[in-house]
Each structure stands twice: as C-alpha cells, then as structure tokens.
C-alpha cells in the first residue's frame, strides 16, 4: 500500500516554473511512517540545512510531563495541541526557531502545510515506500511502536490518513506535495532523488 503515487521524484503539481529553482529556503517533509523522512533530513543537513521536526515539539511536551514518546502518545498529544491552540500550532512554534535554510519534518496536518506555504521559498516533499518495507524499518529502528504486526501497522496508518480538523490528515498532506519520493531502494538512490528535486 503506497499512499502516494511513485513519480520517481518528479513534480506532482505545477507550482514551479520550468527549469531549475533558484533554491529552496524551507523544505517540508511529509510522508508515511518509516518511509525515510529522517534519512532525507540528515542528508539535507550535510547540504547546509538546519533540521526541525514538528514531532520534536510534541516530544518536548511529553518529556515535560514525564510521558513516553510512544507513537500513540505523539499522535494523541499532537492532536490535543492542535485542538487547543489551532491546527497549525506545531508549524508556528517551529518557525519561531528557524533562522536560515531549514528542513521542516513530520508535517501531518493540512493547516500546517497552509501556514508553511506562506513562508518564502517553501516546498513540500512527500516520502513513501511499500508498507511491508516500512513495517520492517519501523521494527528495526527500535522506537516506541504500538503496532506489533503488519496488520496493526496498516490499521494505525489508516487512522492517520483522514483525521479531523485538528488531527492527522496525512492523505491531504501527501496529495498537496510538490514532489513525491519513493524510498524503496538503497540509500544512494534516495539521495540521488533528493538531489534531483530538492537541491
């Protein structure tokens, strides 16, 4: 189950004029769980981008309250923050920290996308991979995962796809991306795709 079409890192929407861009100042990353957003962020860091994650805002919130940063806690707390302070609260808090070229990771709500699109030089990239491969990656990386089986992993992801106004709206984010990168090969291939559409 790929949530986005495999466009081999090509443009998915006509937001950019023909030819190479002058350079993106803000690169937003959205995508399915364990698709490779973190790997892309690390690679872009070597290209001079500072990396921020909307999930880190939630992790800070959990840490202050002595709660584990499990996937369920991240989702529930993120949704709670959006309900209380507005659906774009995580993006607003992160943008207060941005000073130069930056990667904004873990975008999962369409209002976050809308807020970030108001910032100069912003582009949104969606990252996806076959679900079986992503499940293996999720188990291997050792984070707090509530899904013990592939079926549970898929069910959890389905919940994240079409949440309410303050919830996870991953499908909308994927569909609004300027580029889609399918990460189903070696790391060198992923970096080549990033170079092709984002650098």
Image (cartoon, rainbow, N blue to C red):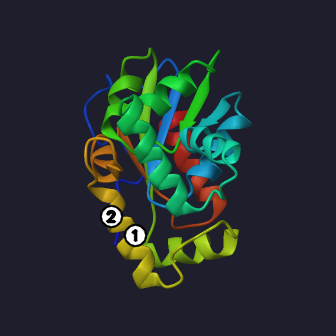
Q: Which residue sits at x=49%, y=48%?
A: 77
**Above or below, 193 relative to 25:** below
Q: Position of residue 14 (x, y in %)?
A: 25, 32
Q: Looking at the figure, which quarter contains the N terminus? A: bottom left
Q: Position of residue 194 (x, y in %)?
A: 55, 44
Q: Secondary structure at mark 2?
A: helix
Q: Position of residue 134 (x, y in %)?
A: 52, 71
Disc 2 and disc 1 in contact, CB within 8 angstroms = yes
Q: Which residue is mark 2?
A: 159
Write down the quadrant of residue 50 in the picture.
top right
Q: Which residue is mark 1?
A: 156
Nearest to the observer: residue 160 or residue 101: 160
Q: Is residue 168 left or right of residue 138?
A: left
Camera sees residue 33:
yes
Q: Position of residue 178 (x, y in %)?
A: 35, 37
Q: Is residue 140 left or right of residue 10?
A: right
Q: Which residue sits at x=60%, y=47%?
A: 40
Q: Secondary structure at mark 1?
A: helix
Camera sees residue 35:
no
Q: Residue furthest right?
A: 46
**Above or below, 193 relative to 146:** above
């Amino acid at each position: 189950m790929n949530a986005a079409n495999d466009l081999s890192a090509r443009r998915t929407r006509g937001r950019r004029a023909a030819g190479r861009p002058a350079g993106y100042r803000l690169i937003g990353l959205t995508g399915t769980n364990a698709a490779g957003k973190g790997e892309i962020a690390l690679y872009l860091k070597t290209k001079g981008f500072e990396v921020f994650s909307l999930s880190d805002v939630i992790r800070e919130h959990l840490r202050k309250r002595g709660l584990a940063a499990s996937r369920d806690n991240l989702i529930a707390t993120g949704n709670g923050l959006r309900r209380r302070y507005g659906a774009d609260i995580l993006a607003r808090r992160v943008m207060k920290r941005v000073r130069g070229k930056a990667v904004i990771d873990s975008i999962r709500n369409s209002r976050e996308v809308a807020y970030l699109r108001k910032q100069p030089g912003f582009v949104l990239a969606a990252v996806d991979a076959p679900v079986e491969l992503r499940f293996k990656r999720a188990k291997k990386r050792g984070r707090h995962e509530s899904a013990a089986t592939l079926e549970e992993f898929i069910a959890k992801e389905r919940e994240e796809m079409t949440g309410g106004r303050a919830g996870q709206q991953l499908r909308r984010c994927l569909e609004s991306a300027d580029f889609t990168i399918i990460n189903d090969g070696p790391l060198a291939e992923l970096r080549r795709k990033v170079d092709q559409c984002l650098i």
